[in-house]
């Protein structure tokens, strides 16, 4: 059976750690598995490379940025392969374009279109461990592309999907997915399983364990994906190891659902900003007139609230990442305001989003009320609210983030799961 393993930057951060990774690959192979390994660049390396580019061009040319950014992974595949060879394991490294991982041409955030598995299959059939560079691909015209920060997760899940692997194991510096960030709430618990839908909402709501696109891929192709720690004993059998991680599942097992807490996690995102466009005419096309130019500038908008119209006028408020705030304000003031003749564009750069996520929300009433009461008891004002079937997000003043996360974690008894 085929196992795809992905190791992040910390897991290959030193030569010793790479040796440990090689031992784990060997242990997996000894269990009778075919092994494909995806690696990231050594920790800090991608940042270093991108900073070099920024020294020359304030806004580096995206095509060239990908040529630079992709080199970190080329180093790790070769080093890890050497470590495997030293252990007497047959191994061979490949870059993304050798394999080949075909992507679209959106430099720095390309999407995978297809993967040609032929070469990998041939190696596997002959007992070779295949080591593939994460984060990178090639577009239809032969240009090097990268998949966005954290993109090696997506490389791994996409390869696992293409190869129909039994499991995609994402090894990282945490030992799984937690009910919230343990750095903020020490009582946070590791989840043994999480559904793909919850994982997607958690990633979208700020949980940084996996790149969101990798979760989308896992869901689309039903790739059993497991998050686990690479910092444990590398010679341990994989099945033992597996018990320690978090498995992303695709159906909610009704028995488990009954025992499970209603909420699976509390996610948060600081670095957010909110923008309000006041007194715009309440007529068709207004939301598009405001948000169209923002989308054209590739700025992601999240919580969007439009007031009920009054006297033919209405207000619209939405959030953007703080890094995009200045750009979004400029577009609205220079391009949108003169066109739609709204009264005012104002904003607040000191907000955060806090979300509770859980499949249990579907079958339990009163979850939102419990969330709002918990925040009210701490005197935390809710500025905006948005909901999905399995997530409730509130926008609050940034300084209350930690408090909000703590009290919600406790209120929903996540310290006891
Ligand atoms: N090395 C790339 C990054 O730092 C990709 C990855 O680590 O997944 O974003
Ligand atoms: Mg990562």
Image (cartoon, rainbow, N blue to C red):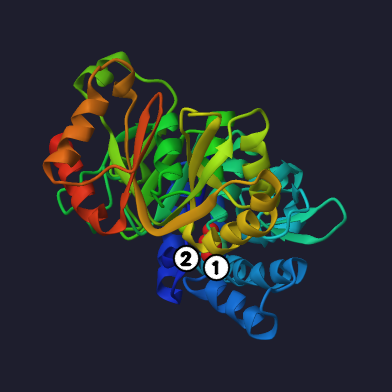
Tell me if residue 125 can be seen: no
**Quarter containing ligand 1?**
bottom right
Asked whether the beta carbons under mark 1 and mark 2 sit within 8 Å of each other, the answer is yes
- Indicate whether 168 appears above or below 182: above
Q: Answer with the quarter of the image where residue 38 lies.
A: bottom right
Closer to us: 403 or 342: 342
Residue 265 in the figure: left or right of residue 151: left
| Residue appearing at x 41%, y 21% in the figure | 251
| Residue appearing at x 55%, y 37% in the figure | 216
Q: Is mark 2 within 8 Å of ligand 1?
A: yes
Q: Is mark 1 within 8 Å of ligand 1?
A: yes
Label 1: how many residues lie within 10 Å, few (<14), some (14-19) or many (20+)? many
Res. 41 mark: 1
Counting labels gives: 2
Q: Answer with the quarter of the image where residue 271 lies.
A: bottom left
- Indicate whether 57 appears above or below 384: below
Q: Answer with the quarter of the image where residue 400 lies.
A: bottom left
Q: Which element type, helix, strand or loop, lies under badge 1? A: loop
In the rendered structure, which disc, 1 or 2, sits on the residue that comes first in sequence?
A: 2
| Residue appearing at x 25%, y 17% in the figure | 364
Q: Position of residue 266 (x, y in %)?
A: 28, 42
Spot the residue most to the front.
311
């Amino acid at each position: 059976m085929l196992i795809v393993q992905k190791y992040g930057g910390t897991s290959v951060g030193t030569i010793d750690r790479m040796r440990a990774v090689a031992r784990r690959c060997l242990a997996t192979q000894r269990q009778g598995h075919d092994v494909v390994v995806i690696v990231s660049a050594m920790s800090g390396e991608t940042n270093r490379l991108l900073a070099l580019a920024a020294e020359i061009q304030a806004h580096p040319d995206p095509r060239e940025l990908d040529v630079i950014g992709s080199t970190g992974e080329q180093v790790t595949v070769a080093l890890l392969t050497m470590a495997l060879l030293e252990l007497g394991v047959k191994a061979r490294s490949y870059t993304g374009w050798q394999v080949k991982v075909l992507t679209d041409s959106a430099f720095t955030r390309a999407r995978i279109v297809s993967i040609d598995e032929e070469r990998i299959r041939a190696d596997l059939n002959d007992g070779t461990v295949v080591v593939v560079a994460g984060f990178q691909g090639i577009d239809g015209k032969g240009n090097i592309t990268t998949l966005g920060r954290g993109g090696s997760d997506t490389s791994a899940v996409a390869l696992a999907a293409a190869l129909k692997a039994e499991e995609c194991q994402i090894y990282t510096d945490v030992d799984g997915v937690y009910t919230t960030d343990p750095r903020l709430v020490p009582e946070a618990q590791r989840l043994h399983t999480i559904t793909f839908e919850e994982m997607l909402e958690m990633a979208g709501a700020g949980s940084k364990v996996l790149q969101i696109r990798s979760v989308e891929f896992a869901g689309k192709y039903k790739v059993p994906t497991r998050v686990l720690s690479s910092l444990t004993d590398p010679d341990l059998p994989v099945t033992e190891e597996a018990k320690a991680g978090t498995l992303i599942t695709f159906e909610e097992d009704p028995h488990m659902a009954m025992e499970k807490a209603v909420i699976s996690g509390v996610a948060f995102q600081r670095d957010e900003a909110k923008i309000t466009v006041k007194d715009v005419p309440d007529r068709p096309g207004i939301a598009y007139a405001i948000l169209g130019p923002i989308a054209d500038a590739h700025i992601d908008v999240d919580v969007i609230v439009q007031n009920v119209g009054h006297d033919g006028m209405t207000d619209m408020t939405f959030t953007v990442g703080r890094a995009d705030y200045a750009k979004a304000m400029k577009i609205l003031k220079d391009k949108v305001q003169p066109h739609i003749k709204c009264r005012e564009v104002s904003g607040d750069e000191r907000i955060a989003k806090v979300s509770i996520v859980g499949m249990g929300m579907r079958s339990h009433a009163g979850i939102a009320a419990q969330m709002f009461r918990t925040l009210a008891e701490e005197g935390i004002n809710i500025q905006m609210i948005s909901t999905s079937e399995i997530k409730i997000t509130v926008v609050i003043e940034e300084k209350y983030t930690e408090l909000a996360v703590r009290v919600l974690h406790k209120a929903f008894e996540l310290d006891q799961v």
